């Protein structure tokens, strides 16, 4: 009898997940692998049982007993059918389909090369969906200054919740304003990821050298140099940050409950500030794009920008050079003689 995995995963998938954990893949990547591959395997079970695509109830499909023999019956046509299901029935975009296919390819590569439980890799020659490259959306310098001003003014969203602009802010509300202004400042000046900001500990900051160590993707450390604005807001925040004990005592940014601030809490706060500033269609990640774009437009070399952002491949960073080329083209198009 097969011992059931706590998450209902088959042992071969659990082994693959553990393999990736050992490679120091990020928790978010591991979470995506588990979801995407479990979903794929449930679709394969439904397919083998003759269940029509429109009638699949993924919550009721068990996959814990899937073994190598079952996986060996999956061929490329089955994978193409799953990709077609994602595209047509679920209307999943090409970028997300590409990510899900990458997980499937990695799984079968592991099964054939590392685990040696399958002879053939049915995903090897599956073509990745073509992704139309989109230029990153970012704030202009004036929009960035407006966002910083909104965050700096003692949290206007809290004032609106009080429904009394003349009412004094409490000390706690002032603290939140200082904290959030520091968060926005770090995002716009350093271009760090959300997970990197949330993971900052006080001892990651070297005040004498004005540098910060962040933990990026794959648990890789990198050094972030802090400019005057960043050092100023960090010192202002630490002056009012509560002293706490326990597992989160060294966390830089704390929640209302005096725990390490969560990704969701930062996203919610940033979203409120963006809305207050009248900046629609932006997100926390767009602040990273903003920092990168503003640095590149002001003369930062693309190789230096790669180090600042923690990109493994220079190709990822080069999208910001395309942003600059796009602006040049727009300038030509906006010439008043363009429509003659």
Image: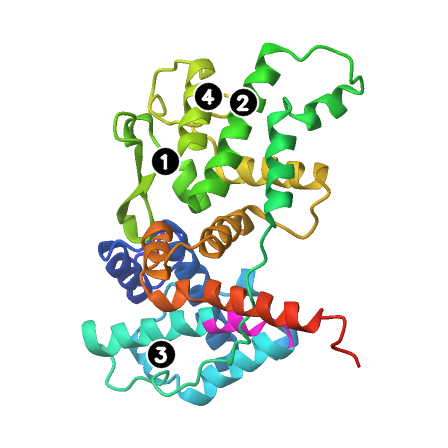
Asked if residue 93 is among those painted magenta in the image, a careful observer would answer yes
Please indicate whether residue 329 sits to the left or right of residue 37 in the image. right
Q: Could you classify mark 2 by the number of other residues whose Cα lies within 10 Å: few (under 14), some (14-19), or many (20 or more)? A: many
Residue 194 disc label: none
Q: What residue lies at 32% left-to-right and 60% top-to-bottom?
A: 303
- Between the residue at mark 1 and the residue at mark 4, the CA separation in whole angstroms equals 15 Å
Distance between the alpha carbons at the discs numbered 4 and 3: 56 Å
Q: Gap between marks 3 and 2, in whole Å? A: 57 Å
Q: Secondary structure at mark 1?
A: loop
Sequence-first tag of 3 and 1: 3
Q: Secondary structure at mark 3?
A: helix
Labels 2 and 4: the sequence-earlier one = 2
Residue 70's disc is 3
Q: Is tag 4's residue or tag 3's residue first in the polypeptide sequence?
A: 3
Camera-side mark, 3 or 2: 2
* Quadrant of residue 270 within the rendered picture: top right
**Residue 261 falls left or right of residue 281:** left
> Which residues fall within the magenta stretch?
89-98
Q: CA distance from mark 2 to mark 4?
A: 6 Å
């Amino acid at each position: 009898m097969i011992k059931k995995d706590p998450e209902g995963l088959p042992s071969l998938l659990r082994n693959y997940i553990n393999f990736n954990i050992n490679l120091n893949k990020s928790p978010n990547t591991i979470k995506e692998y588990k979801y995407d591959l479990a979903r794929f395997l449930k679709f394969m079970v439904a397919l083998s049982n003759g269940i029509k695509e429109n009638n699949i109830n993924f919550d009721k499909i068990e996959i814990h007993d899937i073994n190598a023999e079952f996986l060996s019956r999956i061929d490329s046509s089955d994978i193409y059918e799953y990709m077609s299901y994602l595209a047509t029935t679920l209307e999943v975009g090409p970028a997300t389909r590409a990510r899900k296919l990458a997980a499937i390819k990695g799984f079968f590569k592991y099964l054939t090369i590392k685990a040696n439980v399958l002879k053939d890799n049915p995903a090897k020659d599956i073509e990745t969906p073509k992704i139309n490259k989109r230029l990153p959306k970012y704030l202009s310098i004036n929009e960035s200054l407006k966002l910083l001003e909104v965050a700096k003014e003692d949290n206007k969203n809290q004032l609106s919740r009080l429904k009394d602009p003349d009412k004094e802010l409490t000390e706690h509300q002032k603290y939140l304003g200082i904290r959030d202004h520091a968060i926005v400042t770090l995002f716009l000046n350093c271009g760090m990821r959300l997970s990197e900001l949330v993971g900052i500990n006080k001892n990651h900051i070297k005040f004498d050298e004005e540098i910060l160590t962040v933990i990026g993707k794959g648990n890789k450390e990198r050094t972030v140099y802090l400019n005057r604005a960043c050092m100023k807001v960090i010192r202002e925040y630490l002056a009012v940050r509560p002293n706490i004990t326990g597992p989160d005592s060294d966390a830089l940014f704390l929640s209302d409950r005096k725990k390490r601030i969560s990704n969701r809490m930062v996203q919610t706060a940033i979203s409120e500030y963006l809305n207050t500033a009248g900046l629609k269609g932006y997100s926390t990640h767009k602040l990273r794009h903003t920092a990168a774009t503003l640095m590149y437009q002001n003369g930062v070399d693309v190789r230096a920008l790669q180090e600042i952002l923690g990109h493994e491949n220079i190709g990822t960073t080069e999208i910001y050079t395309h942003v600059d080329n796009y602006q040049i083209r727009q300038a030509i198009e906006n010439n008043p003689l363009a429509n003659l």
